[in-house]
Image (cartoon, grey):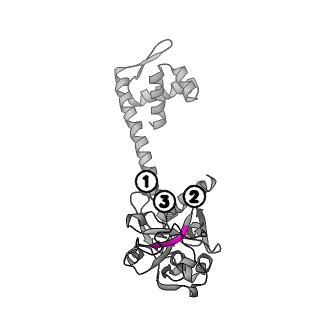
Amino acid sequence: MDTRVLTYFLTVAREENITRAAEILRISQPSLSRQIMQLEEELGLPLFIRGNKNVRLTPEGLLFKSRAEEILSLVDKTREELLNEKEYIAGDIYIGTMESEAFLPLADLISQFSGRYPNVCFHIMSNHSTAIARQVEQGLVDFGFLMGPVNQEKFRYFPAKLSEVWGVLIPGDHPLAGQSQASAGDLLSCPLIVPQRILDNGAFSRILGRPQDYRITATYNLISNVMTLVEAGMGAALCLYRKEYGARGLCFLPLSPRRSEDSAYVVWKKDHVFSQAASRFAREICDSFSELQTT
């Protein structure tokens, strides 16, 4: 007896007609009749009372029908569990990310992935883009979320939508606080706290001009602690806009003319050896961010 024969039996029991059951099962009527007769011989009991056109279950057939349904249900459940076991994903995924509201689509993907694979642990480490690129290249993190440019020879990458505006963050009592924006000239005499990365990669010149023309009193990698320095009156912080500035009672003045960052990327090293969990997450990044590019 195998599950195929049980399916044949249940179809005949449901249809109460061997010819109609054979059509549903897409086998010949004589073959189906023979399978049912062999099943009855194997059990040593009649399962059907046969009429001229229809068949109906004997009391033994009714009991066997109940057991056959239980057996097939258990087989289906077991098959599903075995397939799920093959899809069992566990492990750690390491992501280096800059501080940006553009991180939201990746955060949504992480949340969805975590819901499907609860045995995966994500390790999120904030840093500036230059350091993140270095960590990805060295294999210290699996994925990076950073501002461009991207070394296309080393990294596989997907662009993310980004519109980050440069400006200066100042306390409410700063001399520039009454203005709606700030020019490069306004900042020449102000103590400035600036991101180290834009000094390293030369972007400062694009944003404000020559660094030596300004009074740079401190540099930083992440904005979190810089807000405290601004509150303490150390200087104006050159930074990208964040919603949380207002909650701290700080003023953000966008630069005039406008300066912005328009390129962010999810990246990973081309020859990086992924864990099973990271490999699955990489496929989902490809699917998700490919769709974002077409919307």
The numbered disc on residue 289 is: 2
Residue under circle 3?
104
Q: Nearer the viewer, residue 4 or 83?
A: 83
Could you tell me which residue is drawn at 57 percent across and 67 percent down? Answer: 264
**From what the image shows, is residue 85 above or below residue 128?**
above
In primary-sequence order, the first of circles 2 and 3 is 3
In primary-sequence order, the first of circles 3 and 1 is 3
Could you tell me which residue is drawn at 41 percent across and 64 percent down? Answer: 246
On the image, the x and y values in percent for residue 98 come to 49, 70
**From what the image shows, is residue 145 above or below residue 230?**
above
Q: Nearer the viewer, residue 48 or 158?
A: 158
SS for tag 1?
Answer: helix
- Which amino acid, by three-letter code, is at mark 3? Leu
On the image, the x and y values in percent for residue 240 come to 51, 69
Bin the neighbour count of mark 3 within 10 Å (Cα to Cα): few under 14, some 14-19, many 20 and up: few
Residue under circle 1?
116
On the image, the x and y values in percent for residue 149 come to 62, 73
- Which amino acid, by three-letter code, is at mark 1? Arg
Q: Nearer the viewer, residue 59 or 255?
A: 255
Q: Is residue 169 magenta?
A: yes
Label 2 and label 1: CA atoms lie apart by 19 Å
Q: Quadrant of the N terminus?
A: top left
**From what the image shows, is residue 293 above or below residue 49?**
below
In primary-sequence order, the first of circles 2 and 1 is 1
Could you tell me which residue is drawn at 59 percent across and 76 percent down? Answer: 207
Q: Is residue 40 visible?
A: yes
- Circle nearer the viewer, 3 or 1: 3
Q: Residue furthest top?
A: 52
Which secondary structure dominates the residues rendered in magenta? strand
